[in-house]
Image (spheres, rainbow, N blue to C red):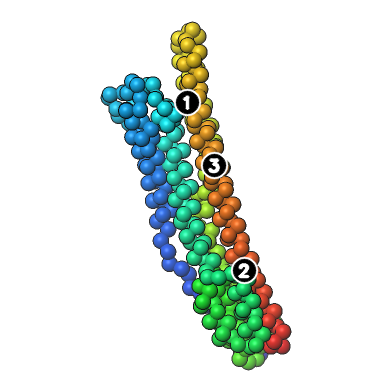
Amino acid sequence: MAENQAKPAAAATTSVQPKKSSNAISWIAPILCIIAGYCIWRYGMGNPAGFDSPDAAGGFWPHHLGPKDAFHRIYEGGIIVPLLVGMLLMVIVFAIERFLTISRALGKGNISNFIRKVQYHLANKNVDAAIAECDKQKGSVGNVMKAGLRRYKEMITEPGLETEQKVAAIQKEVEEATALELPMLQKNLVFISTIVSCGTLIALLGTVMGMIRSFAALGESGGGGDSSALAVGISEALYNTALGIGTSALALIIYNMLTTRIDSITYGIDESGFTLTQSFASLYK
């Protein structure tokens, strides 16, 4: 009897294998986005043709004067601007990557309809048809349900075990399959959530640096400088704040959209586990 009780634990290896996927985007994308942000700032916003008095020497940070329009005026926000542009590009890149991944995880068709079909087949004791529905669904809920159904099918013919033990074995299989699916859905969300928190702070740093430069220039002139020049300097510094707030707002919207879609998958997985255990407990007492 003791050997029979130990059997579920020994056979509790999940049928869902870890997905092999490269996470190179996690460290390549931020670097490329920062480089792209600098190029946009240096060669786009800092294009000499957009200034009345361009810095002919050029270099890493040319000191152009007299921007001709608002786009080139952002250049004078300083070296924080390329970092903010890079963060904006990161939000876009990781949003596209996560939307594609989560769309695949959602699978085909409506999750609620899929679970109802599985419930129908289980009520008719047709486990193979329920597994076939999982193959059609091709999403995370289908993968977890399929793993549970395979153990479900094994437990139907498993001798010497109580119903509670069989239900526990099915539940454990579902939990192990879930533990393999969820990390794939949540990967790289940390970048978007970090930008939500840090985007505005980094923008504020750029604004403060710009205002320090403006007031320092005013102090060097003995306080007799042109007040309009001071106003222009402050407005240029505030471009950092505008860019940072816009980036953080976009990141927050995208983060909430992604987590909402992940929650729908999580609820489907929870419902699938409940469906399997309740079905087995009621049909195979």
Q: Which residue is drawn at the image coordinates 57% and 48% (left, top)?
A: 253
- CA gap, disc 2 and disc 1: 49 Å
Q: Is residue 61 visible?
A: no
Please determine whether, in this image, residue 36 is positioned above or below residue 96: above
**Mark 3 or mark 1, earlier in chain:** 1
Residue linked to disc 1:
236
**Badge 2 vs badge 1, beta-carbon distance below 8 Å:** no
Q: Is residue 238 left or right of residue 152?
A: left
Q: Is residue 242 visible?
A: yes
**Badge 2 vs badge 3, beta-carbon distance below 8 Å:** no
**Mark 2 or mark 1, earlier in chain:** 1
Task: Tell me the kind of residue under disc 1.
Answer: Glu
Q: Residues within 10 Å of mark 1 (few under 14, many from 20)?
A: many
Q: How many marks?
A: 3
Image position, residue 144 (x, y; %) = 56, 73
- The numbered mark at residue 248 is 3
Image position, residue 46 (x, y; %) = 36, 30
Image position, residue 238 (x, y; %) = 51, 28
Q: Quadrant of residue 171?
A: bottom right
Q: Quadrant of the C terminus?
A: bottom right
In terms of secondary structure, where does tag 3 sit?
helix
Task: Tell me the kind of residue under disc 2.
Answer: Gly
Task: Tell me the kind of residue under disc 3.
Answer: Ser
- Residue that sits furthest to the left in the current view: 57
